[in-house]
Image (tube, grey):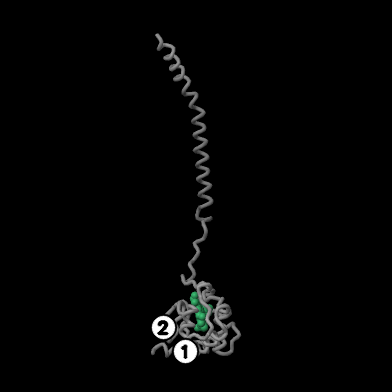
Amino acid sequence: MNSHPSESAEARRHATEPPSRQPERIVALVVVGLVSLYALWILRVDGPSHAPPIVAESATAVTLLPEKVPLTTGEEPIAEIFIRAGCPVCHTIPGIPGADGRVGPKLTLGTTGPQRLRDPSYSGQAETVHDYVVESVLEPERFIVSGYPSRTMPAWYGSKLSALALQRIAAYLEQQTDSEMDR
Ligand code: HEC
């Protein structure tokens, strides 16, 4: 007999269940709706049109940080000046061990220097090959050799190379010709 009141309470609970679940469903639907909107918003924000552009790797992965390049006095053997400055990373230089870089032109300025100065598109101020080399090192953006990437040759050599180092670099490079590459 004791069970009777609890049975009826149970029955009453059952009877009221369906209406009491109704608000829960609405809440669930609203939540699903909000989640979908949120997902759409995320997709809109992170979708392809908003994704950061895939930055084209510069023509080369070669980067030379100025703080990694030691100062040169110009008293060092010529090979050491080039190697310390990092030129061989990007340039092939006759007579310099390991200087077989391909990012920039071969530094056979004895051959290419006069060609640059004659080039109608030459936009620098040098009148001699020697000055052209100096200019190319101090202000690489003045003239970009056709077929090679701009803003690749470091523009900070002026603060790393002594005047003597620069003179010796120019004096060396203006002597290098393409035929010497065949030695
Ligand atoms: C990170 C790569 C890189 C390094 C390091 C670099 N260069 Fe260059 N250099 C280039 C590129 C690329 C060009 C061609 C584009 C231009 O004209 O700026 C160039 C052009 C030149 C030119 C003109 C060549 C020509 O045929 O007219 C000279 C001279 C030169 N570099 C000398 C040097 C010297 C000397 C050093 C070291 C002190 C050096 N470069 C270091 C990339 C480099």
x, y percentage for residue 153? 52, 76
Relative to 113, residue 63 above or below = above
Q: Quick one: SS at disc 1? A: loop
Q: CA distance from mark 2 to mark 1?
A: 15 Å
- Which residue is found at the position 46% from the left and 77% from the top? 90
Relative to 110, residue 88 above or below = above
Q: Quick one: SS at disc 2? A: loop
**Ligand 1 within 8 Å of the CB at mark 1:** no
Quadrant of res 122: bottom right
Say if residue 178 shows up in the picture. yes
Residue type at tag 2: Pro
- Which residue is found at the position 55% from the left and 78% from the top? 160
Residue that numbered label 2 is attached to: 97
- Crowding near pointer 2: few (<14 within 10 Å), some, many (20+)? few
Residue type at tag 1: Gln
**Ligand 1 within 8 Å of the CB at mark 2:** no
* Residue projecting furthest to the left: 183
Depth check: give the residue in front, 74 or 82. Answer: 74
- Which residue is found at the position 52% from the left and 33% from the top? 27
- Which residue is found at the position 47% from the left and 84% from the top? 107
x, y percentage for residue 67? 53, 72
Instruction: Work out which quarter of the rendered image holds the C terminus and state it.
Output: bottom left
Residue 28: mark in rendering: none
- Crowding near pointer 1: few (<14 within 10 Å), some, many (20+)? many
2 or 1: mark nearer the eye: 2
Say if residue 145 shows up in the picture. no
Depth check: give the residue in front, 119 or 179. Answer: 179
Residue 176: mark in rendering: 1
Instruction: Work out which quarter of the rendered image holds the N terminus and state it.
Output: top left
Upstream in sequence: badge 2 or badge 1: 2
